[in-house]
């Protein structure tokens, strides 16, 4: 018996090895190669700096507080699970960007592995391999991996994948729990239950499964509704949230009309990713704009065709699934940024499967070559994200008529002690592009104030104040310029107005204490050092306010 068992064991091993070498695409080699490829493609992000909104994490009193682990779950805050990971990053590694980038890249690699395990269950092996490679290696994935603040998208997608896996494995209630976690990471996952529902109907061709899954599925839709309500509440109590129905000219109708063109732009970037841009200049559509309506007509035709084909060929459902997953950010709820590459991460799960179906009969050498090209393009794009300067120079080159990239590059050059002449040129270019833009005027005013041109600074701050007369930061800047010019009375009045507008504004309070000390009003300085009830400051800000009393 022992000899017989050993012979069978050897035969089984030989058979497995033969299958492994004969069909490497269907073995464990495929996900390992794809995951290693993703690691190599995005490895430059590990040495990247922070970017743009990343810096706001270190001025967030909740993230910097020792009690932040539970405060992130307050009702007025969104994305609590994501901010919990930021809080943990800060506790473990401080403000070293390496730890933050390690977490982002690890999340992407985990998502790739989960995607592979799911794709094998919902598609044939060739489709699964192609889809996993596209999802893992496509350059469009660079922004969510390289941009720390985009971790919310990675984390939400990761929980959606866990939810999808449990849904397929017959654990619907655990799937609902993971979906709830996805919503706590980022609310843009809210369409995922609809994606599961429609996908299951197309693949099963019946609704008998509802008997076992109607309750957990209903719970998922209820969670999505609660997350939406919470999002709108948080938006209503948060300044500059960048979402909602009070974004000036970005009305729901114009935003929806614009998104037809945006979706075609996304699809174009999937097909031709050589023109990626962190801050793309994308104009808001007018209600009577013919090309915008035409974009929606063609898009509606594509969606209708997807519905028709999916009913007869379930494997073609994935294009329709892409539109479902993209709907939360490309529909009727306005967002300040009309287009953002990171919003494609979760929809790429379904679109990658659609691409896999399209390319499943392509010869393997050709597919391998495509994978190498994608890997190389992602590596190159990751290098663009190395520093603030490299990122914003690339953005300016691709969006020369946009103001924000010029302002951000000027800030980056200041941080790296770049030449004042180039910074001034960038700020003047921004001012020329948007002569009435308060942010451009503010940045130019700050430059003038720091270089000793207080009169020029005052003029710029006056312009910024004209567009936002009750803005605390604009009032504080205006007061600082007045103080530099020796107008103490007007400076004090400006600081007081700023504190009335926002009692918690750090710069206004800090400057008011400095002014009180300069005037010998110690009692006033002591009073100001005690923040108003409800005010929260970072440890550095609290230390700065306390230090002012020793002057």
Image (cartoon, helix red, strand yellow):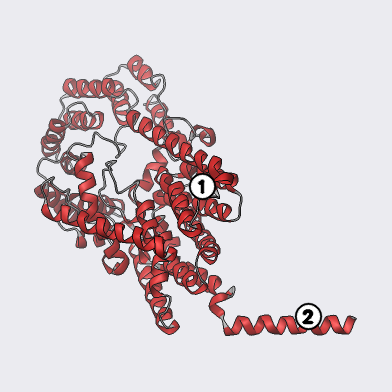
How many angstroms separate mark 2 from mark 1 (CA)? 48 Å
User: Residue lying farthest right?
Assistant: 1
Badge 2 crowding class, 10 Å Cα cut-off, few under 14, some 14 to 19, many 20 or more, is few
Using the rendered image of the protein, determine whether residue 356 is visible from the camera's viewpoint.
yes
User: Quarter of the image containing the C terminus?
Assistant: top left
Q: Is residue 361 left or right of residue 245?
A: right
Residue lying at 47% horizontally and 54% vertically, measured from the top left = 201
Q: Nearer the viewer, residue 455 or 225?
A: 225
Q: Nearer the viewer, residue 331 or 30?
A: 331
Q: Is residue 464 above or below residue 97?
A: above
* Residue 89 - label: 1
Q: Nearer the viewer, residue 525 or 65?
A: 65
Q: Is residue 354 left or right of residue 34?
A: left
Mark 1 element type: helix
Q: Is residue 465 left or right of residue 229?
A: left
User: Quarter of the image containing the N terminus?
Assistant: bottom right
**Image location of residue 509, percent across then percent down:** 32, 25
Residue lying at 13% horizontally and 34% vertically, measured from the top left = 458
Residue 212: image quadrant is: top right
Using the rendered image of the protein, determine whether residue 152 is visible from the camera's viewpoint.
no
Mark 2 element type: helix
**Image location of residue 252, percent across then percent down:** 23, 40
Q: Earlier in the sequence, mark 2 or mark 1?
A: 2
Q: Which residue is identified by label 2? A: 9
Q: Is residue 157 above or below residue 141?
A: above
**Image location of residue 108, percent across then percent down:** 48, 59
Residue lying at 25% horizontally and 59% vertically, measured from the top left = 301
């Amino acid at each position: 018996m022992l000899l017989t068992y050993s012979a069978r064991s050897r035969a089984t091993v030989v058979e497995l090895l033969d299958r492994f070498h004969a069909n490497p695409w269907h073995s464990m080699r495929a996900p390992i190669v794809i995951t290693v490829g993703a690691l190599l493609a995005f490895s430059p992000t590990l040495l990247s700096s922070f970017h743009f909104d990343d810096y706001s994490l270190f001025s967030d009193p909740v993230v910097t507080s020792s009690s932040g682990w539970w405060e992130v779950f307050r009702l007025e805050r969104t994305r609590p699970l994501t901010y919990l990971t930021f809080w943990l990053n800060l506790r473990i590694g401080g403000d070293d960007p390496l730890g933050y980038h390690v977490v982002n890249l690890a999340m992407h690699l985990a998502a790739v592995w989960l995607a592979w395990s799911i794709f094998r269950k919902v598609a044939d092996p060739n489709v699964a391999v192609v889809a996993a490679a596209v999802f893992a290696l496509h350059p469009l994935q660079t922004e969510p991996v390289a941009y720390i603040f985009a971790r919310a998208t990675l984390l939400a997608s990761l929980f959606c994948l866990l939810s999808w896996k449990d849904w397929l494995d017959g654990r619907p209630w655990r799937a609902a729990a993971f979906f709830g976690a996805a919503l706590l990471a980022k609310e843009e996952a809210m369409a995922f239950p609809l994606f599961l529902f429609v996908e299951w109907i197309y693949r099963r061709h019946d609704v008998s499964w509802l008997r076992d899954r109607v309750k957990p599925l209903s719970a998922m839709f209820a969670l999505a509704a609660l997350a939406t309500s919470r999002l709108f509440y948080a938006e209503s109590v948060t300044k500059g949230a960048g979402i909602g129905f009070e974004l000036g000219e970005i009305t729901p109708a114009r935003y929806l009309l614009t998104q037809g063109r945006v979706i075609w732009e996304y699809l174009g970037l999937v097909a031709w990713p050589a023109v990626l841009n962190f801050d793309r200049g994308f104009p808001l559509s007018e209600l009577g704009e013919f090309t915008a309506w035409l974009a929606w007509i063609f898009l509606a035709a594509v969606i209708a065709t997807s519905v028709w084909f999916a009913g007869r060929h379930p494997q073609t459902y994935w294009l329709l699934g892409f539109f479902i997953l993209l709907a939360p950010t490309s529909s009727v709820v306005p967002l300040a940024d009309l287009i953002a590459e990171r919003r494609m991460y979760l929809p790429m799960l379904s679109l990658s499967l659609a691409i896999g179906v399209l390319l499943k009969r392509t010869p393997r050498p050709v597919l391998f070559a495509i994978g190498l090209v994608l890997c190389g393009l992602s590596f190159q794009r990751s290098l663009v994200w190395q520093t603030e300067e490299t990122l914003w120079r690339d953005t300016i080159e691709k969006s020369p008529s946009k103001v924000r990239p010029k302002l951000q590059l000027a800030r980056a050059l200041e941080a790296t002690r770049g030449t004042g002449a180039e910074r001034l040129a960038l700020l003047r270019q921004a001012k020329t592009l948007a002569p009435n833009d308060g942010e451009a005027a503010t940045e130019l005013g700050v430059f003038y104030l720091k270089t000793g041109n207080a009169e020029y600074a005052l003029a710029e701050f006056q312009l910024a104040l004209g567009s936002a007369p009750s803005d605390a930061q604009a009032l504080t800047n205006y007061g600082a310029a007045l103080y530099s010019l020796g107008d103490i009375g007007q400076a004090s009045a400006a600081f007081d107005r700023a504190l009335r507008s926002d009692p918690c504004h750090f710069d206004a309070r800090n400057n008011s204490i400095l002014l009180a000390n300069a005037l010998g009003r110690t009692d006033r300085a002591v009073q100001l050092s005690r923040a108003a009830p409800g005010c929260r400051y970072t440890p550095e800000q609290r230390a700065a306010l306390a230090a002012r009393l020793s002057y």
